[in-house]
Amino acid sequence: MKFEVKLPLFEGPFDLLLFFIERDELDIYDIPIFQITENFLEYVHQLEKLNIEVASEFILVAATLMRIKAKMLLPRPVIDEEGNELDPREELIRHLLEYKRYKSVIAELVQLETDRLDRERRGNIAKEIKHLAETTNVEAELQNLDLFKLLKVYQKVMSRYELEKNKVVHQVVQYPYTISNQKSYILDSLQSTGRMAFTDLIQEKPEKIYVIFNFLAILELLQLQLIRLHLGEGYNNFWIERQEEVAVD
């Protein structure tokens, strides 16, 4: 038996993002993507610790935030056909503003629904049903029933059963990697080895998702000026070195 847990504050991922924006008094047109991504992922991890199944839309928005964060870490901006620099956050901001507009009218719609339910419906349902039962000749309908009609009904039922049985079920698999852990791993490795090649790093575990997490961790460390990169020999290879701390007199 499955139990559906519905948090009272957040009806979906955009509701959660708006909560962070209003709580921290952030500018919705200039979202600090690093801060809001960390808050969003922390909330998702809390759901997982409580053994609450994370909805697929939360996973999708988390992946979108990570993608925007990675784009903003890259030194080369995205340019449109007219040569204008594109903001990776533009689409997210547009969806948030649209969701905020819809959310602003929810309270009014709920009140209209409550008022409508409080009204007395016209007619007498029980009396009408009784009248229909008395006027309908059930025996006459059964006389027109033949084997072909029964087979058609059976075919429809079986088709519906096959559709339900073969319905695609999506399963979200959580990878055992985090950008924070990979950042610590890279810094610890550099502490002992001095420098390391990117090809050596990915050869330890040549999985696509592992390479992605390591690459994002390197981008963040580069953004924080904790490491520096040197282009090495070979295709798509470079050396990673720990950034030396500058002594302050």
Image (tube, rainbow, N blue to C red):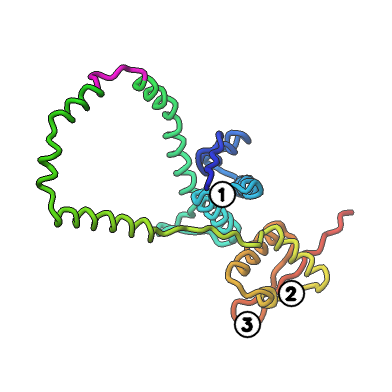
Q: Nearer the viewer, mark 3 or mark 2?
A: 2
Q: Quadrant of residue 39?
A: top right
Q: Nearer the viewer, mark 1 or mark 2?
A: 1
Identified by mark 3, the residue type is Gly
- Residue in the picture at 81% in, 74% down: 193
Q: Is residue 8 visible?
A: yes
User: Which label's residue is closer to the chain start, 3 or 2?
Assistant: 2
- In magenta, the rendered stretch is 118-125
Q: Is residue 35 visible?
A: no
Q: Which residue is mark 1?
A: 53
* Front one among 215 and 176: 176
Q: Quadrant of residue 24?
A: top right
Name the chief secondary structure element in magenta: loop
Height in image: 246 above or below 32?
below
- Residue in the picture at 55% in, 43% down: 30
Q: Residue 94, image x and y in percent?
A: 45, 44
How much space separates mark 3 and mark 2, taking CA atoms?
14 Å
Q: Which mark is residue 234?
A: 3
Q: Are marks 3 and 1 in contact (CB under 8 Å)?
A: no
User: Which label's residue is closer to the chain start, 3 or 1?
Assistant: 1
Identified by mark 1, the residue type is Glu
How much space separates mark 3 and mark 1, taking CA atoms?
44 Å
Tell whether 119 sits left or right of 51.
left
Secondary structure, mark 3, is: loop
Q: Nearer the viewer, mark 3 or mark 1?
A: 1
